[in-house]
Amino acid sequence: MSNRWRTVSILTLTTFVLSIVLNLGSNSLMAVMPLYSSLVLLVLIIFMGIAFDVIGVAAAAGRETPFHAMASNRVRGAREGIWLVRNADQVSVFCNDVVGDIGGTLSGAVGASIVFQLSRRGFPLPETILSTVMIAVVAALTVGGKAMAKSFAISRSVDILLIAGKVLHALGKLGFDFGHSKPRKGKSRKGR
């Protein structure tokens, strides 16, 4: 199997498994959560999608040069920043597509649960209108948030990737390996 098909297969399987786990978890939580907690969870899911979108765009817009300077000064997260830039295509697919699509699916499920809770409590609008308004609000917040965040991600890519690098560095210290411990040689994007 070619490397490209292998990557696509792994991403598809990862998305499938993550969607099941997160959907089951959110459905279980929604069954016992009060309405205000459900609203908070919805906002957090939307924010997570926007935050990962920012990381994916920053990786695609990033350049290695500032991270090489930081890495030579042993700045924590700089080596991981180099890895994020060198693997921008994979980082972007994971952050923008995998996490973004899962976030969209979860926000829709949580929104539907909120509509059900409101209807059960006797909210004066019909369920069809409530559902339509909820979908519109979730879509507007997601698309609007991502649109606002894109220019920020491009203009502040070094800062964003350094923060993401520090998170990856901390996770590496806890034993999680995302394959970023040693940046690959030969795929420099210094000139970008």
Image (tube, grey):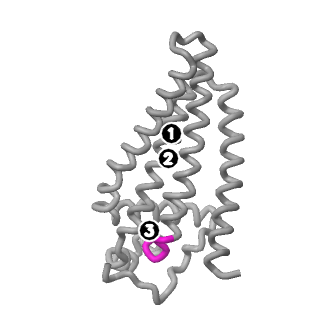
Q: Residue at x 65, y 37 (%)?
A: 26
> Who is closer to the viewer here, 145 or 29?
145
- Looking at the image, residue 72 sits to the left or right of residue 126; the answer is left
Q: Residue at x 62, y 22 (%)?
A: 116
Label 1: which residue? 44
Of the two numbered discs 3 and 2 on the same chain, state the one appearing first in sequence.
Answer: 2
Task: For mark 1, give the secondary structure.
Answer: helix
Q: Amino acid at mark 1?
A: Leu
Q: Point out the image quarter for the N terminus.
A: bottom right
Q: Residue at x 69, y 27 (%)?
A: 31
- Label 1: how many residues lie within 10 Å, few (<14), some (14-19) or many (20+)? some
Start-end of magenta stretch: 85-89
Coordinates of residue 102 in the picture (x, y in percent): 58, 49
Q: Is residue 69 above or below residue 124?
A: below
Label 2: which residue? 48
**Proximity of marks 1 and 2: CB atoms separated by less than 8 Å:** yes
Q: Nearer the viewer, mark 3 or mark 1?
A: 1
Q: Amino acid at mark 3?
A: Arg
Q: Is residue 128 above or below residue 94?
A: above
- Looking at the image, residue 133 sits to the left or right of residue 65; the answer is right
Q: Amino acid at mark 2?
A: Met
